[in-house]
Amino acid sequence: MQFRIGSGHDTHRLAAGRPLILGGVVIPHDKGLVGHSDADAVLHAVTDALLGAAGLGDIGDAYPDTDPRYLGADSRVFLTETLAKLNLLGWRVVNLDVTIFAQEPKLGPVKATIRASLAELLAVSLDCVNVKAKTGEKVGHIGRAEAIGTHAVVLIEKAISHQLSAVSKTEPVPTAG
Ligand SMILES: [Zn+2]
C-alpha cells in the first residue's frame, strides 16, 4: 500500500439569516455561515484535505467562488465529486479526523450526527471518522462567535500497482547454479 496524508482548513463568518450547515448537517441556530456556496466549513476543509492528500490543488481551483454555478451550491457535491476523482486514481480513504472550532452553538449534541454524515459521504465505516468540537475560549473571531472554523486531516491509501511489478520484471533473473 501507498499512503498519503492531507490537511484542510476553512473558516466562514457567522451571520443572521443563513442556515447553519456543518458536515452536510443542518444545525438549528439563529445564525449561519456566509459564503458563495452553502458555506459548509467542515465539508470545505475535508474536501481540501482530500485534494491535498492526492496532490490535486485546492477547493478554490476546483470550485471557484467567482463561478455563478456554485452560488448557493450544496457542498456535499464538492466532497463527493472530489472523492470520485480520487477513487478514479485508485485512492481510498483510510480515516478522517476533523476538529470544528465554534463558540456557539454548542456542537456536543450534533457531533455524532456530523460524524455519521461524513462517514456516509466518504463511504467509509463510522470508526474511520472522528469529529471533535472546540470553542474559541471567548477570544478572537471564533471566540466572539463571529466565525466557525474547521481543521481536517485525512489519510488515503492506494494499492501499489504495476509500476513496482514493472520494476521487478526488469531486475536480472538470478541464474541457477
Ligand atoms: Zn469554505
Image: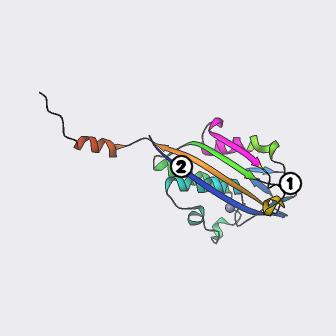
Question: Does the beta carbon at disc 2 come under 8 Å from ligand 1?
Answer: no
Point out the stretch of residues depicted in magenta. 114-133
Return the x and y of residue 5 as percentages of the image width and height.
53, 49
Please tell me whether residue 31 is drawn above or below residue 173 in the rendered image: below
- Amino acid type at circle 1 is His
Q: Secondary structure at mark 2?
A: strand
Q: Amino acid at mark 2?
A: Ile
Q: Residue at x 14, y 33 (%)?
A: 175
Q: Nearer the viewer, residue 93 or 151?
A: 151
Local packing at callout 1 (Cα closer than 10 Å; few below 14, some 14-19, many 20+) is: some
The residue lying toward the viewer, choosing from 18 and 3, is 3
Q: Is residue 114 visible?
A: yes
Residue tagged 2: 5
Q: CA distance from mark 2 to mark 1?
A: 33 Å
| Residue beneath the point at 76% across and 47% down | 133
Residue 148 location in percent, x, y? 76, 58
Q: Which residue is mark 1?
A: 29
Q: Residue at x 63, y 52 (%)?
A: 46
Image quarter hosting the C terminus? top left
Quarter, ligand 1: bottom right
Q: Quadrant of residue 116?
A: top right
